[in-house]
Amino acid sequence: MSSANVALDDIGPGLKLRFDRTLAFMRASDVAPRKILDLGPDNTFSQVLRQEGYEVINTGLVDLDVHPEVVADFDVDCVTSFELFEHLVAPYNVLQHLPDVPMFATVPLRLWFATAYRNPSDEWDRHYHEFESWQFDWLLDKAGWSIDRTEKWTSPTRITGIRPLLRRFWPRYYAVEAHPAQP
């Protein structure tokens, strides 16, 4: 089951750890947003943010590759994009249309021997990109964003296998705080 669809009462330890790290990353910022534009449909983490006192507006289930302009006209304090950019064919276009406010984003990192994730039965549950941190940094820079700080997290799991074992040591998630670059 996708983490986007987990009921708050059913959040497991791995997902709770990821959510806790994401919240801690946001709280460590000098930015203190109250009103957030969260890219993508309403999801479990949007609900967590609301429980934490944030006002969260989601863009909904809109194909942002086809309609990047839908993100432009929101009156918000910041933008969040948690595990969304990897689903887009052209995340650059969305980044170009975002409001002129700070952004918090996370993307899953590529494991060197693994191919991009693909759910053949759900077109919304596919990764076009499996980023390396330098690639995401470059994308943000090219789209006119300046990076303030970053963190990388591992993703420990109780599942057995080579990939889950490597995820205990090799960073799985990359968190970025950025702001629009000044011309």
Image (spheres, rainbow, N blue to C red):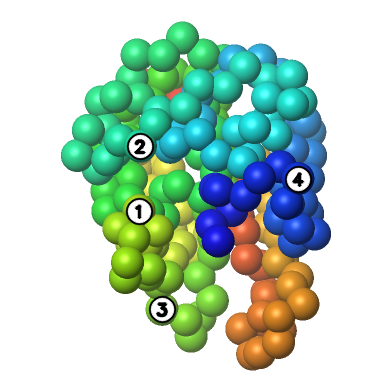
Q: Nearer the viewer, mark 4 or mark 2?
A: 4
Q: Nearer the viewer, mark 1 or mark 4?
A: 4
Q: Residues within 10 Å of mark 3 (few under 14, many from 20)?
A: few
Q: How many marks?
A: 4
Location of residue 32 in the rendering, given as x and y in whole percent from the top left corner: 71, 18
The label shown at residue 89 is none
**Residue occupied by mark 2:** 61
**As drawn, is 37 to the left or to the right of 141?**
right
**As drawn, is 118 to the left or to the right of 54?**
left
Disc 3 is placed on an element classified as loop
**Residue occupied by mark 4:** 9
Task: Give me the C-alpha separation between circle 3 and circle 2.
Answer: 25 Å
Location of residue 167 in the rendering, given as x and y in whole percent from the top left corner: 68, 75
Q: Is residue 169 visible?
A: no
Task: Give me the C-alpha separation between circle 1 and circle 4.
Answer: 24 Å
Q: Amino acid at mark 2?
A: Leu
Q: Is residue 52 visible?
A: yes
Q: Amino acid at mark 1?
A: Trp
Mark 4 or 3, nearer chain start: 4
Task: Give me the C-alpha separation between circle 2 and circle 1.
Answer: 9 Å
Extreme-top residue of the structure:
75
Mark 4 or 2, nearer chain start: 4
> Looking at the rendering, which quadrant does residue 157 occupy?
bottom right
**Residue occupied by mark 1:** 124
Residues tagged 2 and 1 counted as in contact (Cβ below 8 A): yes
**As drawn, is 59 to the left or to the right of 52?**
left
Q: Amino acid at mark 4?
A: Asp
> Looking at the rendering, which quadrant does residue 182 occupy?
top left
Location of residue 64 in the rendering, given as x and y in whole percent from the top left corner: 29, 38
Task: Give me the C-alpha separation between circle 4 and circle 3.
Answer: 32 Å
